[in-house]
Amino acid sequence: MLRPGGCLAITFSNRWFPTKAIRIWEDLHEFERPGLVLEYFLESGCYRDLQTWSLRGLPRPPDDPYADRLAGADPVYAVWGLRV
């Protein structure tokens, strides 16, 4: 339970496992996924002051096991709102 005025934040990257995701997740482009999460907030009617955010283009740290194969770090997406 979230008290009125409490913040619910959903964060995710573009990495996912098909066995652990809802079916539509695979069909959406990664830029559409925050919109889907936002739609869930809107449809619930329980949140206000909804916002989205993304961070992309950061370099991978040198100690990252994938640094030699992928130059950029995984993007991060967030959707949040305050409980009505």
Image (cartoon, rainbow, N blue to C red):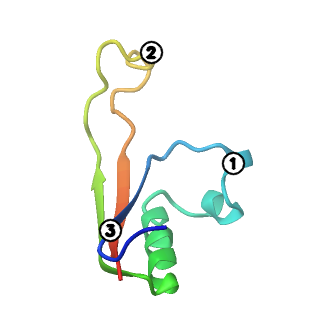
Closer to the camera in the image, 23 or 50: 50
Q: Position of residue 11 (x, y in %)?
A: 41, 53
Considering the numbered disc 3 on the image, is that residue within a helix, a strand or a loop?
A: loop
Q: Residue type at mark 1: give it.
A: Lys
- Reading the image, the residue beneath label 2 is 65
Considering the numbered disc 2 on the image, is that residue within a helix, a strand or a loop?
A: loop
Q: Position of residue 13 (x, y in %)?
A: 44, 46
Q: Residue type at mark 2: give it.
A: Pro
Q: Residue at horizontal 44%, vertical 82%?
A: 46
Residue furthest out toward the right: 19
Task: Name which of mark 1 and mark 2 comes first in the sequence.
Answer: 1
Q: Residues within 10 Å of mark 3 (few under 14, many from 20)?
A: few
Q: Residue type at mark 3: give it.
A: Gly
- Reading the image, the residue beneath label 3 is 6
Numbered disc in front, either 3 or 2: 3
Closer to the camera in the image, 14 or 69: 14
Q: Calculate the distance from the C-alpha at mark 3 to the C-alpha at mark 2.
A: 37 Å
Q: Residue at horizontal 27%, vertical 41%?
A: 57
- Reading the image, the residue beneath label 1 is 20
Q: Position of residue 78 (x, y in %)?
A: 36, 57
Q: Position of residue 32 (x, y in %)?
A: 47, 66
Q: Calculate the distance from the C-alpha at mark 1 to the C-alpha at mark 3.
A: 27 Å
Image quarter hosting the C terminus: bottom left
